[in-house]
Image: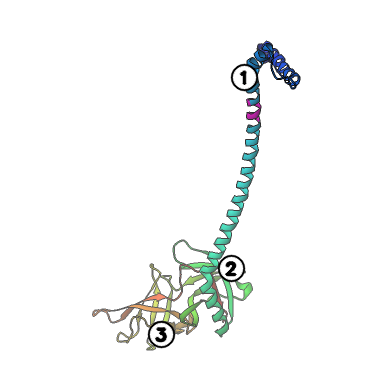
Amino acid sequence: MLFFKKYKNRMIVSLIAIILIVIIGVTNSERLKLTAMERFLGNAFSPIQKFIFSIGRNVYEFFGSIKNISNLMEENEELKLKVAKLEEENRRYEDLIGKSEYIINEKKLLESTNYKLIPAQVAGKEPGNWFNRFTIDKGSNDGIEKGDTVIQAVEVDEEIVLEGVVGRVVEVGDNWSKVISIIDENNNISFKVIRTQDGGIVSGSLDGNLNGYLFDSKADVMKGDKLFSSGLGGVYLPDLYIGEITDVIKEDEDLTKKIKVKPAVDFKKLYKVYVILD
C-alpha cells in the first residue's frame, strides 16, 4: 500500500505513456513517417517498455526454472530408487556367487551321504572372528538332540565331497540349538590318519586351527596327511573329515609327537550346516 502511494504518479504517467505508444502503433500502420510528438514519446517511453518486458521475461524464466528444478528433483528420486534396486540385486548376485561353491558341494553330499541330515541355518554366534560357538535355527521339534554331530559339505579332492565335521550340539530348545565347534579350546576330538591309521587327539586353538598329538610318538605322519574322526569315546561319529596336517613337531624331551591341523571347514564363513540324526 505504501509502495502504491509513493509511486502513484509515476505509475499513472507510465500507464498513459504505454497507452499512447499502443495508439501510435495502431494509427501508424499506414504512415511512412512519425510526427515529432510521436517520436518524442517513443524515445521517452521505449526504455520503460523495455524494462517492463524484461521484468515479464525474467518472471517467466524464474517460474520456468522452478518447474525445471521440481522435475529434476523427481528424476533424482527416481534415479536413487533405481540405484538402490541395482545395488540390492548386485548384493544378491555377489552373495550367490560367494555361496556357489558351497551349493555345488552340498548337492554332491546329499547325493552320496548315508546319513539322515537336517539342514539348519546359523542364527547367531558368540563375539569374535571365529564360529567357536553358535546357534542354529533347528531344535527338538526337528528331532535334534544334545550330542548330535554337526557337519558341512567339504570338497577334499576334485569331484570328491565328504562330511566335514563342524562340531556337536550341546544345548537344545524347541526351535533352536547351540553348537560347540571343533576349533573351540574346550572341545577335543579323537582322530585317525587316513594314510597310516595312526590315532590321536586334537583340540581347538585361538587362531582357528587345531593342535594335537599322536598316541604313538613314532607314528609316520607328515604334512599334508588327512585326518578323520575315529569315533573313539563316542563323542563324534567316525569317518568324518577333520582336516589336514600343516606341521609335525617332535621334541626330544617330549614323548609325544605333536601336530598342527588346518580344519576342512572354514570357520569364518559358516552360514548353513547339517545335523546328523543318529
Q: What residue is shown with label 1?
A: 47
Mark closer to the chain start, 1 or 2: 1
- Which residue is at a point 28% across and 82% down the rendered structure image? 255
Q: What residue is shown with label 2?
A: 137
| Alpha-carbon span between mark 1 and mark 2 | 83 Å
- SS of the residue at dot 2? loop
Q: What residue is shown with label 3?
A: 192
**Quarter of the N terminus within the rendering:** top right
Magenta-colored stretch includes residue 57: yes
**Quarter of the C terminus within the rendering:** bottom right
Depth-wise, is mark 3 or mark 1 nearer the camera?
Answer: 1
- What are the residue bounds of the magenta stretch? 54-59
Q: How would you rate the neighbour count of disc 3 (Cα within 10 Å): few for under 14, some for 14-19, many for 20 or more?
A: many
Point out the residue furthest to the bottom here.
Answer: 196
Q: How would you rate the neighbour count of disc 2 (Cα within 10 Å): few for under 14, some for 14-19, many for 20 or more?
A: some
**Could you tell me the amino acid type at mark 3?**
Lys
**Could you tell me the amino acid type at mark 1?**
Pro
- Which residue is at a point 40% across and 82% down the rendered structure image? 226
